[in-house]
Amino acid sequence: MKKNFIKYVIIAGCAGFLLLTGYVDAASQYYGCVFYIKDNNFWINDLSNNASNQITHLEVSIGTGVVSNPSISVDGTKIIFSYKANTSSETSLYSIGYDGSGLENISSTYNLTAQTKNQTYGALSPDMTKIAFAAEPRAASPTNGRQLWLQELTGLKRLFQLTFMNGDCQDIQFLDDSHIIFKHKLQYLEDFYIISTNGSDLTNLTNNNSIEPYFPRLGRPYLNQAHASISYAKQTQDANGYSNWDIYQLDIQTMTEVQILTNLYFPVNPEIQADPQPVLITDSSSIDTAIVFRGTREFSDEISLYIASFESQNPYITVIPESTNAKFPMFFPSTVKPVKFVYTSGSPAQVYVVNSSNQIVQLTQTINTNYDPVIDPSGSIVAYAGNGIWKIKADGTDAVQIDTLYTARYPAISPDGKWIAYVKSNDIYARKIDLSSPIIRLTNSPNIEKLELSFAPSKSEILYTGSTESGHQIFSLPITISSNTITVNGQPTNLTQNPGYENYQASYSPDGKKIIFISTRQGSPAIFIMNPDGSAQQQIVLQTQPSNPCYPQFSSWQDDVRIAFISAGYINIANLETKSITQASPAISPAGKFSWGKLIKNNVSITRQLPYNRVDGNLPYYIYCLNISINPLNTPTSFIITEQLPTILSGASANWKITGAWFNDIELSPLTSSGNTTGIVKWIVSNNIGSIFPITDGTLKLKIEFDGGTPVSGSWNFINGSIIYGSTKSMISGDSYIAYGEPDCPADTDGDKKISDSELLFTIDAWAVNSRIDGWPIILSDWDLHLLKIINFWAKGGYIYAPSAIEPSWRSKSI
């Protein structure tokens, strides 16, 4: 039974009465985890069981120094923080996984020190493709102080300076994939700003210069889980000086500021009071329910973390244990990284799936033996060999035979889940999972044994083990996957070239940067890794070297430093950071190969895409999309989509009104299930007659017109939404904020009104595979025309905005 420690402070007054006050440890009524820094290390408190644990020992891994200014990624998998070693004159950015593993020097990895110094306040974009941070320019600059920078982590991997302001940028967070909120300080003037990721649309949210000379002091701003508001502490100022800190919440759309917590106690004068650094925490329904803050309870000089309800009369009742002298609290609803395993067992061997909740599902019941099970990264689809090649859902339904040849083996599922490659008669073949294409032969060398296939995450190679005169080696076959076919682009490459030794069972890391495999070059089987080109081959060293390991695999989760493999007959999991090995739970003893993938619990996920970076309010309408993904294993019988559109009442300059709606290009009538086309709109989705559209993956395209009011250039719009299925509610992800103004050409990803060589190549790549750039083009069949225009912009040195009567458009500068 969990203990609640109650400490009473008894104060005897001259009137002879007793006043009892106290505090208790954090109660299990709250949901999620609070991360914080204590003694220059990261700690985590699980609010559900009231346990606080230290998750790093940075003095061991990177040395003694100052750890500060952390942020946590939207998916909770990564923490970015600043670190200044005691022996260094500069601050750098680092990252760790949510469990304290996977330490990485980001400043070094992305060479941020070449153009900047003292990188701090790093934050990852929700889609994990960009990092924003504050730093000083390395070269001489006309401005003083820390500026806001953006580093692309994928694609072109460019570095941009977004601000050119005197003073310091700090406390950086992403509102959505395209917009950043930050605090700026110039001497005594402090304000919160929003800026687009291409450096445009800089907007001052607080405008505190209007109350000169009594500027307020602002604390660290922190976004709530819905990214609709920020919480922060503020000290107001008058002729008598600063007030004590109070805690506020600012609605970013309406710019309404509400005081949510007062009655804070401080043992020192306002001028030297520490920022309470408030963070809003949510309940299991994602509703803001309480505040975590740094504070000092009355009659004490110790700073700890406390949890208080809004407008609490005594905010010091609930304390987070082991939080003395803690700072920089952060909240995340969950840190669980659930997985599932697929394997064969029994005689004859059948295919089973077991997830991290210990639920076991038998997928096959055949009289023949089954082999080589593999699960796709999403954990939804399983392929296996057994009297042919088969595909089946991970819940045991919808079995489909891909190839009928009894001896076909070694299936592999493409990263997009649409293709299965396999070996038949010593050659590699492929077929679409939905059987919409004929079987394709990828190799023509039946005299060479091939086995153990694996797709690259980029879909550009297939790994396989091939026999040679000097043993088995690992080969890479270059391929291109299009909508209806797979083509081979050249000859296979021998990656291991290790004559006299066996190299086999290779597979990629989820980011495609490493290949893990088994090699006997040390005399007995051991786990090795190498780069995708075969370089940097080295053995993985663990605390205890496993005995005769086989089938090593990286976790399917990005930035997860775990690998799994079979040793001594059981599946084991090793942490590459700590070098520790634990047996998978429950214990699994496969008959042969196994595979593991993600356990995704959401029945339905929706991502919002705004195809242009600004809305031209002078045009008659604007179109944006909701991309809907249905979990094939947990398909809901029905769900409700809710979108909250900008309205004048909520602070927008004009109402957004839906005047057209299409699902997978089929026009909807009525436009919404609720009948509303402004404000809060809803769609009820089911497979029953009368549903507004069926339950399937697809895109809901919305046509927006501006009804009432006049769009004001530079003003912001906030779109928020959710999905409800049963008693579960989740938020729509993706773009949420957009300003009125002239949109840039979507191919101009840095907003400089030009198309660079790299941007042109990036656009051609998207055109070649018929994919979109952040939701553009809305109509894919228009790609050819758009590409010709973009090539012209590249050739003519730039473009200008030249909209048609109904939609955004651009023309080259020379016209």
Image (cartoon, helix red, strand yellow):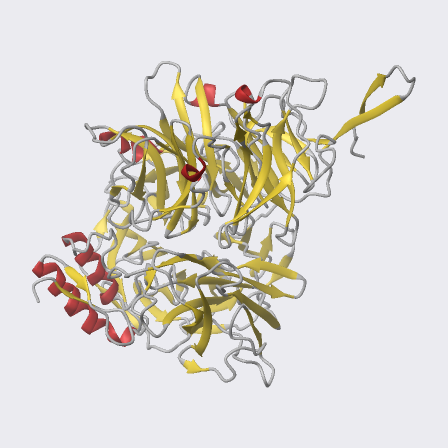
Viewer-nearest residue: 528 or 709: 709
Q: Position of residue 171 (x, y in %)?
A: 44, 35
Q: Quadrant of the N terminus?
A: top right
Residue drawn at the location 47% of the way across and 82% of the way down:
668
User: Which quadrant of the figure has residue 119?
Assistant: top left
Viewer-nearest residue: 129 or 330: 330
Q: Answer whether residue 456 is visible to the viewer in this image.
A: yes
* Left or right: 279 in relation to 412: right
Q: Position of residue 645 (x, y in %)?
A: 49, 65
**Residue furthest out toward the front:** 239
Q: Relative to 579, does residue 394 appear above or below in the rendering?
A: below
User: Which quadrant of the figure has residue 442?
Assistant: bottom left
Viewer-nearest residue: 311 or 477: 311
**Residue furthest out toward the right:** 16
Q: Position of residue 596 (x, y in %)?
A: 50, 51
Residue drawn at the location 35% of the way across and 45% of the way down:
130
Q: Answer whether residue 55 is visible to the viewer in this image.
A: no
* Left or right: 169 in relation to 55: left
Viewer-nearest residue: 643 or 780: 643
Q: Position of residue 206 (x, y in %)?
A: 45, 43
Q: Relative to 10, does residue 679 appear above or below in the rendering?
A: below
Residue drawn at the location 20% of the way across and 73% of the way down:
784
Instruction: Give the total of numbered labels.
Output: 0
Q: Quadrant of the C terminus?
A: bottom left
* Left or right: 93 in relation to 560: left
